[in-house]
Amino acid sequence: MKLMETELDADKKAAFYRDLVAAAGAENVTDNEVVRATYAFDISPNLPCLPEFVVKPKSVAQVQEILKTCDRYVVPVTPIAAGLNAAGTCIPSPGGIALDLRWMDNILEINTEAAYALVEPGVTFDKLSSALNKVGFRTHVPTAPGGASVMGNSLNGAGELPGRHADPILALEAVLPSGEIVRTGSAAVPGGSWQSPSGPYAGLTHLFCCFGTMGVVTKMAIRIYPILEDRRVLMVGFDAFSAAMPFANEVLRSGIAEASIVWNHHFYKSYDIAVKREGPPDMPTELSGDARKPPDYLPYNIVTVHMSGYRDDMDGHQKTCDVLAARFGGKLLDRQEWEDRIPGLFRATAQFFTEYHAPKMEHNKKYGMGKYIPWIIPSPAARLVGIEAMALDKMCDDLGAQPVFYYVKANDRGRSWVFRIFSYFDPDDRQLHQRVRETYNDMFKWALEKYNIAPTRHRRARGSVLDQLGGYGHLLKSIKQVVDPNNIMNPGVGIF
Ligand SMILES: Cc1cc2nc3c(=O)[nH]c(=O)nc-3n(C[C@H](O)[C@H](O)[C@H](O)COP(=O)(O)OP(=O)(O)OC[C@H]3O[C@@H](n4cnc5c(N)ncnc54)[C@H](O)[C@@H]3O)c2cc1C
């Protein structure tokens, strides 16, 4: 295994270790090679890097002392909530530590009156969903498996599937490299509560949505939602993306849907992949066709309309949805008629969105097909029509990828959307991975030049776009200089 170079010399390392143990407690620090090796890589194609130490704090006070120590020795710190990101952003830096926050996993408060939950970094969606379920509440639907942390997923590009809101975070607490504690939103006032992103003066919450480069977040308040009497997912078929998008926008804007997703036919048929214990999975035949040309009996796109409320209201919304579908050139799919054509999709959406509100492992079986390398971009609805066509052509023609999956998800009632396209590439074909990365970079360049859109999801390999962002880039770099003058916070992630 080729590793990145390490940079800590022996004397410095011994002194650093002494102080680190004083800061974190001996039982929370290890240099065991086997343990370190488990932190060196993730499922992305990035080069592995062994941390010098793995540190597992159990309190905010320990996090403060650890950061002060690392800052004094100028040792890189890579925070890890669950380490499940698929972008290399938790791979440690040469000579650095892996700061594993999984043992800080308390749900500090569930406030059903103000509809928020206050969590520590290690709280997973499974843990929070199960606690919330007992009091009739839920989180937004995560863009991650149930074992991912609520905090990591929310920090990771500010969440993607709240539908009603731009992001799930209300307020947070972070520790800076100096050891100072900062609280944001309504919690900025000493002794203040956690229910609002509005605090005195400028909002600072999203300063910390920067892949661990600004400090370590130790508490986060997120929005929670009551589980209402009736929850439904309607499916509407369309023969053109340019018709599906305005429909999805309309059901969000009118308040019929709390979330809406547009899926391409390879993706929604992928729910019918059957993974076997031995040999390759059974694939639906549709996945071997051109992603741009679905067979006659399948819609080009399916739009899922996620609704919940009182039963009578849902009945009314369903009728309106039927009318709107026809108005925009689509068709509400009758469950009885369609369940045998796409059984996996009906099963999955029920489990995801109406029963447990947490993804099941079954839904991740596609990951067995190869190396998952996604291209992700945020966009207003109107620009997505051009982006979809370009991205499909690049994936199908330039990369020869097959199958090709995409979905488009709304934030903030359709004001902004996230487009994600991907395939599963041969895990051993490094040259192909390189070609995929180069093609994706071309696609990002195209999106920036044609539509002035920059990616919000950071991938370690892609590097920083700050230099292309004018005054915003300068300001963020200046803030970083003040907050983290020694650049110890996750420098390997490649933003600063
Ligand atoms: C099977 C699978 C399916 C997935 N599906 C999707 C999908 O459909 N859509 C999608 O968008 N993503 C998907 N993902 C990616 C998913 O979003 C991430 O895996 C997950 O959100 C990361 O959460 P985590 O708790 O593991 O965070 P981590 O990987 O631990 O951290 C993510 C980033 O945040 C930083 N960080 C973590 N905690 C802190 C902290 N306390 N303070 C400061 N910085 C911190 C880390 O340094 C890192 O840069 C999938 C991943 C897997 C494994």
Image: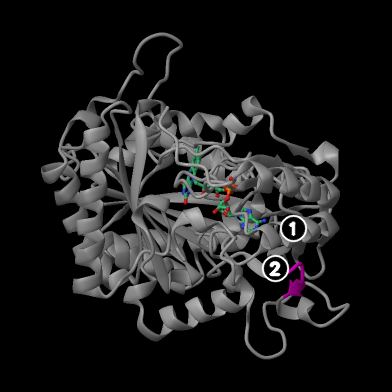
Report the span colored magenta: 177-183
- What mark, if any, has residue 215 been given in the picture? none
- Looking at this view, is 202 or 45 the one in front? 45
Question: Element at badge 1?
Answer: helix
Horizontal and vertical percent position of residue 432? 22, 36
In the image, farthest residue toward the bottom: 201
Q: Residue at x 51, y 29 (%)?
A: 362
**Quick one: which residue is furthest to the top in this view?**
278
Where in the figure is residue 112, as x and y percent of width and height? 81, 63
User: Residue 261 lies in what quarter of the image?
Assistant: bottom left
Q: Which circle marks residue 176 in the picture?
A: 2
Identify which residue, 204 or 467, lies in the foreground: 467
Instruction: State how far apart marks 2 and 1 are (Cα).
Output: 12 Å
Question: Is residue 295 something that shows in the picture?
Answer: yes
Name the one closer to the observer, 294 or 211: 211
The reply to whether dot 2 and dot 1 touch (C-beta < 8 Å) is: no
Instruction: Determine if the magenta segment contains residue 181.
Output: yes
Residue 188 found in image quarter: bottom right
| Amino acid type indicated by mark 1 | Thr
Task: Decide: is 36 above or below 159.
Answer: above
Residue 372: quarter of image? top left
Residue at 17 percent of width and 57 percent of height: 390
**Colouring of the image:** one colour
Q: In screen coordinates, is 317 left or right of 236?
A: right
Q: Which kind of residue does numbered mark 2 sit on?
A: Leu
Q: For marks 2 and 1, give the one nearer the viewer.
A: 1
Residue drawn at x 19%, y 45% as measured from the top left: 395
Pointer 1 residue: 69
Q: Is mark 1 within 8 Å of ligand 1?
A: no
